[in-house]
Amino acid sequence: MSVVAQCLSGRNAVVVGASSGINLGIAQRLGSLGARIAIVSRSRERIEAAADALRSDRLDVTAHAGDVRDAGAMQAIMTEVAAAKGMIDIIVSGAAGNFFVPAAKMSPNAFKTVIDIDLIGTFNVLSAAYPHLKRPGAVLVNITAPQAGRAMPMQAHACSAKAGIEMLTRCLALEWGVEGIRVNAVSPGPIADTEGLARLATDPELAERIRGALALPRFGQRIDIANAVAWLCSETASFVTGTTIDCDGGMRLGNLYAPD
């Protein structure tokens, strides 16, 4: 097996929001590169099923149930992982919630729900992990979205939350860099066979319009995002911090000349 294939060998990674979709793909990729994986999600049943799927690929994985909105739960999970595996090397924070609603019809509680899961949840994860990774070489990767830099209708809550995540990423990179901790983010675009794309493209015609508006006119695959995260976690990205990688086929560019 090549050095590249085991570039994360011996490293301990925690992937939050990994019961399915993009984050489960990230966990699988980090594990395939040699990392020992702890996956976290709110549902005990779903996270155990995800862990079983990863174990079927002969990956070293443990499952932990906890809600990112509960700071105490995140602290308990990080303490448990560190006690079992030693210091934590990699954190991927990807838990998210979203739905489409016009701002004028959005209740304060609806807005707060997405902020609580996406933005406050991200802070809870990173804050809980910090005591267990205070050393050079530790890596934090937040999963954000094009809504962070591109206004979208019926997405005021998600746009606000994702923009907050990207600023939090930069602030923590600045504060924690002195300890050798790198903090970055990855922004996925429309990814095939995910819940996010299903909600965005509610029929084949709309899906085709979204695809055609991308600079790279195809939907992404989960491995595209997983590879971007894996690169940020590797030594080849050792001088990269405080940045967001737009792994979105050019979605954030905005194609004014896309066909109607």
Image (cartoon, rainbow, N blue to C red):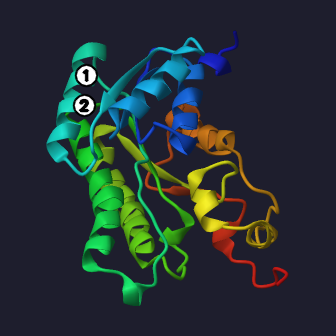
In the depicted view, which residue is nearer to us: 49 or 83?
A: 49
Whether residues under marks 1 and 2 lie with C-beta atoms below 8 angstroms apart, the answer is: yes
Task: Say which mark, if any, is on residue 82.
Answer: 1
At label 2, the amino acid type is Met
Residue at x 50% of width, y 43% of height:
239
Q: Image check: 178 left or right of 203?
A: left
Mark 1 and mark 2: span between their CA atoms? Answer: 6 Å
Q: Image check: 210 left or right of 11?
A: right
The local secondary structure at tag 1 comes to helix
Which residue position is annotated with label 2? 78
Q: Image check: 138 left or right of 208?
A: left
**Quadrant into which the N terminus falls:** top right
Residue 38 lies, in percent from the top left, at 39, 25
Query: What is the residue that sits farthest to the right in this orientation?
Result: 259
Residue 89 lies, in percent from the top left, at 37, 28
Q: Is residue 170 above or below residue 178?
A: below
Mark 1 closeness class: few <14, some 14–19, many ≥20 residues within 10 Å: some
The local secondary structure at tag 2 comes to helix
Residue at x 47% of width, y 26% of height:
49
**Does the image show residue 60?**
yes
Q: Is residue 174 above or below residue 20?
A: below
**Does the image show residue 7?**
no
In the depicted view, which residue is nearer to us: 232 or 205?
A: 205
Query: What is the residue that sits farthest to the left in this orientation?
Result: 72
